[in-house]
Image: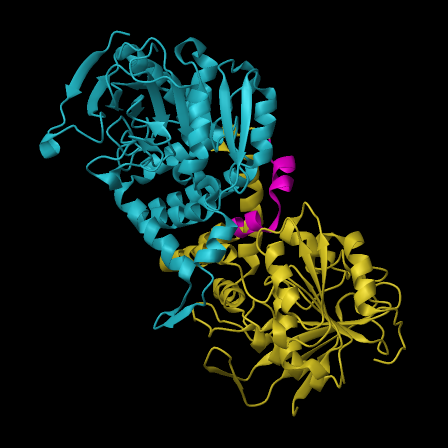
Chain colours: A yellow, B cyan
Amino acid sequence: MNASLKSVSRSRSGSTQIHGRASAHEGVLEMPGEMSLYHGGKLTGVHIAWRFVGPADAPVVCALGGISANRRVCTTEEPKNSWWGQIAGAGCALDSDRFRVLSFDYLGASGDTTGPVEGVAFPNISSYDQAAVLLALVDHLNIQSLRAIAGGSYGGMVALAFGERYPERVSQLLVIGASDRAHPMATAWRTVQRRIVRFGLECGKSKEGLQLARALAMSTYRSSEEFAARFGGPATQGEEGFAFPVEDYLFSRGADYAAKTRPEAFLCLSESIDLHRVDASRIFVPTAAVAIREDQLVPLADVRTMVARLPSGRLHEISSVYGHDAFLKECEQLRPIFNAALGNAAAGSPE
Amino acid sequence: MNASLKSVSRSRSGSTQIHGRASAHEGVLEMPGEMSLYHGGKLTGVHIAWRFVGPADAPVVCALGGISANRRVCTTEEPKNSWWGQIAGAGCALDSDRFRVLSFDYLGASGDTTGPVEGVAFPNISSYDQAAVLLALVDHLNIQSLRAIAGGSYGGMVALAFGERYPERVSQLLVIGASDRAHPMATAWRTVQRRIVRFGLECGKSKEGLQLARALAMSTYRSSEEFAARFGGPATQGEEGFAFPVEDYLFSRGADYAAKTRPEAFLCLSESIDLHRVDASRIFVPTAAVAIREDQLVPLADVRTMVARLPSGRLHEISSVYGHDAFLKECEQLRPIFNAALGNAAAGSPE
């Protein structure tokens, strides 16, 4: 691909050292010409912010997360800015001493990749479009073939889309809490979230709308059991009426999210999840699919059905009080699954 | 109780005949003096709209439903206005030929009982307050003791509150999809609904807010399996973007609800559910509790825990794709449970 590389050197803290042998390297790919989108429409001047962590000579694993994730996968000097810090990093299930971890800010998101401008709607983005962006990155970075794509939630959907389209460019998919299509109950909850955000935009109160939508989303990410254990206490009566323990949690998390996310970006990626549909029978890349029994958004039954259609699929069932969020939290349960899927390749092994 | 009866004769359609031997009789109880509320505050001039269906000499069963239910329990000449038409009526699980079915419009609701005026907040109402209203009705109608209270959802909570407070006035509780307290996950969803409604009120768009809240509520009433079967089709692309099958369902039901419900009434009763806390170990009335395995709002585990604490409780577990709404739909599964709980008493048996 004829793309120019603007490598952005990391100057903050004067170091790119993370842990062990891992070091970070970032850049921005400016894609030439037009990008045709799966659901119709085109984008021009697309730029993709990407990031590597790990030894330069190690096999490359692309790590992709939920719609609020970004290119900062591993624990860094800013742990709060790293969304997969419990799973990926030196000595972790996805070991950044053994693999070079690649990621990018999603198209249509709130990061440094091309996304919506405030107040302007962005075209519909497909998981196939994110896969096309990743292909451009893989070309640009001269990676013959990815050792794997490890994706949780929306990232799992993008992994499946990439595997269907570009099987020669990836050896293994590891998909956690994602399926070949969204479940209608999950679509129901996200539809309500998007309507709340649009309602907020109409009323000139976009932050409040986004806070409300994220509060609802938070209730779908964990299990009923976890909420029972954490928030079983009685309501407290204040001057403005009763407040419930779970309410404080949901709305403070909602406010955090609304402070750093553009409403239009949320709308774009939330809808991208619900529009995701891949043909599992045409994904020939070996695929390890992890289903969480307590996942309210991606039920075990859906992952089972998908795996039965995959030509080379393997199902791993785990249990977790974290529900859908298990992909962010269950380090010890995911470690053997990562080991089995990624093999014992160490830094320096051929890709 | 020193209360005056204004019996309202039913003139519409010129008949009070329903089915079989059942006939309807309605009235309004005007409660004298002040009513002290469980969560603080008082109400004066409270009036309660009640309704009887069934033979005058039959044992009385009080039937209570969810927060959108009202006194019109059984199928009438206006079937759409009857919320328990599949369960209660002539020949149904709750047989209005064998029992006289009593109900009332909830305090704080949108019916003909005292409730909020538009634009004015109403005090917090407890399930104990609804039980006190029912006690006033039982006194007023000269019922020595109810044969049973059969309650689904919020109505089950009111039944439990009545059983704890006034055990000498009821022989049996039949509680479906309700427990001694709300589950924090269900509280999470209702909290978001109330915040949406308040957001709509702040923005001067109360109907839109209530429609959104009800759309969310609808997604919690059924099971994931039912949504998968009904709404698994792809999105359709229109001029305003994509629409999902489940979205059309949720928002048309939301609009119906918003057209007939006062936002302040929704806020009052929704919060009443989350504030509900009874002491199961002090409910000595024999209690049959029906748990629906697919109920997202009232998990089986919570009903089991409650029944273990009830001095005289019996658990019935059922499965239903209707989830929480099974109390409205599962006629054949509920019939033997009603028969066991209500006994074989026919019209004319002593109460």
Residue B39 in view here: no
Query: Is residue A79 a member of the stretch shown in magenta?
Result: no
In the displayed structure, does residue B90 sit left or right of residue B154?
left
Quadrant location of the N terminus of chain B? top left
Quick check: B291 left or right of B81?
Answer: right
Across and down, in percent, residue B344 comes to 39, 19
The residue at the point 67 percent across, 53 percent down is A292
Q: Position of residue A94 (x, y in %)?
A: 79, 63
- The answer to which quarter of the image holds residue B247 is bottom left
Res A293 seen here:
yes
Most foreground residue, A47 or B70: B70
Q: Is residue B53 left or right of residue B10?
A: right
Residue situated furthest bottom in the rendering = A2
Name the image quarter holding the C terminus of chain B: top left
Residue in view at x 78 percent, y 53 percent = A333
Q: Compared with residue A32, is residue B103 higher up or lower down, i.e. above or below?
A: above
- Closest to the observer: B125 or B329? B329
What is the magenta range? Answer: A215-232
Q: Is residue A224 magenta?
A: yes
Task: Give above or below for B200 relative to A199.
Answer: above
Q: Position of residue A158 (x, y in %)?
A: 62, 71
Q: Nearer the viewer, residue B92 or A16?
A: B92
Percent x, y of residue A122: 46, 73
The part of the image, by quadrant, that contains residue B243 is bottom left
Q: Where, by quadrant of the figure, is residue B47 drawn?
A: top left
Q: Main secondary structure of the magenta part?
A: helix
Residue B31 higher or lower than A292, as above or below = above
